[in-house]
Image (tube, coloured by chain):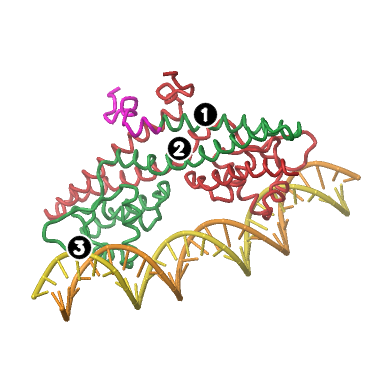
Chain colours: A green, B red, C yellow, D orange
Amino acid sequence: MKEHDRLAKTRSMVIDAIAQNMHLYGITPSAGRLYGLLFFSDKPLTLDEMKEELGMSKTSMSNSVRSLLDLNMVEKVWVKGERKDLYSIRDDWYQVFFDYFTIRWRTAITMNSTAMEKSISKLNELIDDPNTTEAVREQALTDMKKLQERLDYYDWQNRLLDSFETKDILNFVPIEKKND
Amino acid sequence: MKEHDRLAKTRSMVIDAIAQNMHLYGITPSAGRLYGLLFFSDKPLTLDEMKEELGMSKTSMSNSVRSLLDLNMVEKVWVKGERKDLYSIRDDWYQVFFDYFTIRWRTAITMNSTAMEKSISKLNELIDDPNTTEAVREQALTDMKKLQERLDYYDWQNRLLDSFETKDILNFVPIEKKND
DNA sequence: TATTCCGTACAGTTTTTTCTGTACGTACTA
DNA sequence: TAGTACGTACAGAAAAAACTGTACGGAATA
């Protein structure tokens, strides 16, 4: 069985690396290991198989799978005559990469933008209020300028994310590398 | 003091949003709050001022500042005749954004690529070994193909990151939005 | 040189997150 | 309809992370 060990060791080295870096996607190392397992698996796996393979509880597998599903990194597969749910890795890496930004970054940018727009509106009220002292009005104007700059930046980020979502970015950075 | 409260409330709303979304950069909410504080501060702050403002320990401030420094989100400022270290936010947002990918993503991609290249090399040995059974050889070939595909994907990511690092991306997604 | 002040390493505590086992709702089977 | 199998909600346990106070090394001051 020496040769199987060599194969397994090779796999686990890669899985370790993947698991360790999965935090970039907000995924725990455990879910990262699961992802690595699915990466090498040539057939979809059930929760019980995962549990068996990783020596963890079924509940953990269920949760990990969900977090991977949320990011479209994994998909549920239907297999005729199989009662259990089956999951396999989604192998269009580029789409997964783009989805991550659409799902996580877009949300964050929107949240921040919304808060800042609300804030700007409140600051405007404050500035227009005749009872506001000059010192406060000045401060409000300074804050508003900062917020406005930041909103411009978020607008840029949104446009970058647009190019991900539409895959336009691939015109600029093509999948096939230029042969030069 | 009603007007100061309104100003403060407006700020804290924005700071909350920032703090909450800072996890995208692998920054804790606490460090995120600090970042928000520095965002609005019109002068560099000392650790003691931060500690005072956020009601946390100086040690925490020290750690938070370091994590922000690591990502180039904050910079140490020298002020004549001041013994304490002063820190202010780096306000070239775009650069900060690019730096994040250079610092965190590039590292991760390199780690994964290295592991996979090593793995491929081991698999090649296994394939060349005359003692290897046919079943294992086949499996090794399958694994190798997967790893090779993944390496191509990492190469694409690296090229995307190159365009960030060189700021070439700004030719594709310009800071100034087109007026259409 | 002695003294004071500053930032951080370190160890211990608190808080948060992750993981597990049990229990339950739903869907398939007989 | 009763029984079985599956996935997940929930509560508690274990592990990890964040936070604090103390103590120390190094730099500025006197």
Q: Label 1 amino acid?
A: Asp
Residue at mark 1: A152
Quote the CA–CA distance across marks 3 and 2. Answer: 39 Å
Question: Dot 3: few (<14), some (14–19), or many (≥20) neighbours within 10 Å?
Answer: few
For marks 1 and 3, the one nearer the N-term is 3
Q: Residue at x 67, y 50 (%)?
A: B54
Residue B6 appears left or right of B111: right
- Mark 1: which secondary structure? helix
Q: Are marks 1 and 3 in contact (CB under 8 Å)?
A: no
The relative height of residue A15 versus residue A117 in the rendered view (above or below) is below
Q: Amino acid at mark 2?
A: Phe
- Region of the chain picked out in magenta, as a range: A161-180
Residue ID at (68%, 32%): A127
Query: Which quarter shows the N terminus of chain A?
Result: bottom left
> Which-is-in-front pick, marks 1 and 3?
1
Chain letter of the residue beneath label 1 in the structure image: A
Of residue B101 and residue A60, the one placed in the foreground of this image is A60
What's the distance in space between the residues labelled 1 and 2, CA to CA?
20 Å
Label 1, residues with CA under 10 Å away: few <14, some 14-19, many ≥20: some
Residue B167: percent from left, percent from top: 46, 26
Q: x, y (%) of residue A155?
A: 47, 30
Q: Measuring 11% from the left and 61% from the top, which residue is drawn there? A: A81
Callout 2: 10 Å neighbours few (<14), some, many (20+)?
some
Q: Which mark is residue A84?
A: 3
Q: Amino acid at mark 3?
A: Lys
Same subunit, labels 3 and 2: the answer reads no
Task: Inspect the magenta stretch and tell me whether residue B85 lies in it.
Answer: no
Q: Quadrant of the C terminus of chain A?
A: top left
- The label shown at residue A24 is none
Q: How far, Cα to Cα, is label 1 from label 3?
A: 49 Å
